[in-house]
């Protein structure tokens, strides 16, 4: 009889743990989604800032592209 009670108690604990995992996963997924959205917004703002800086620059397209490519080659 004691074994049956122990099994029932274990089963209840397992069910609770499973439920907790499901809740934690939902919360995790929501936080990851929020993080992705925030990072996408940040990247869009940076992209807009870069485009505006390029448009205001007195450098030509070729000069800017050459500068970026030279920087990439120096970093490798």
Image (cartoon, rainbow, N blue to C red):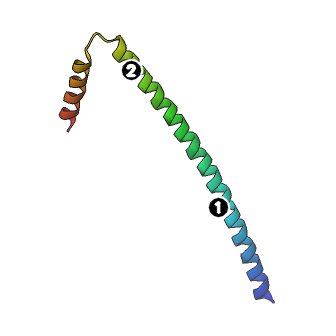
Quarter of the image for residue 12 reads bottom right
Disc nearest the viewer among 2 and 1: 2
Lower position in the chain sequence, tag 2 or tag 1? 1
Q: Is residue 40 left or right of residue 65?
A: right
Q: Position of residue 50 (x, y in %)?
A: 38, 22
Q: Position of residue 32 (x, y in %)?
A: 56, 46
Q: Position of residue 70 (x, y in %)?
A: 19, 28
Q: Which quadrant holds the C terminus?
A: top left
Instruction: State the mark number for residue 51.
Output: 2
Instruction: State the mark number for residue 21.
Output: 1
Where is 22 relative to 28, above or below?
A: below
Where is 67 relative to 23, above or below?
A: above
**Pointer 2: residues within 10 angstroms few (<14), some, or many (20+)?**
few
Q: Which quadrant holds the N terminus?
A: bottom right
CB of mark 2 within 8 Å of CB of mark 1? no
In this rendering, the count of numbered labels is 2
Where is 22 relative to 30, above or below?
A: below
Q: Residue furthest bottom?
A: 1
Q: Residue furthest front?
A: 61
Q: Is residue 13 left or right of residue 30?
A: right
């Amino acid at each position: 009889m004691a074994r049956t009670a122990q099994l029932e108690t274990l089963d209840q604990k397992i069910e609770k743990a499973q439920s907790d995992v499901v809740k934690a996963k939902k919360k995790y997924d929501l936080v990851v989604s929020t993080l992705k959205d925030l990072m996408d917004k940040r990247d869009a703002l940076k992209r807009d800032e870069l485009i505006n800086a390029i448009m205001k620059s007195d450098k030509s397209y070729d000069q800017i592209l050459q500068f970026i490519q030279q920087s990439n080659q120096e970093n490798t």
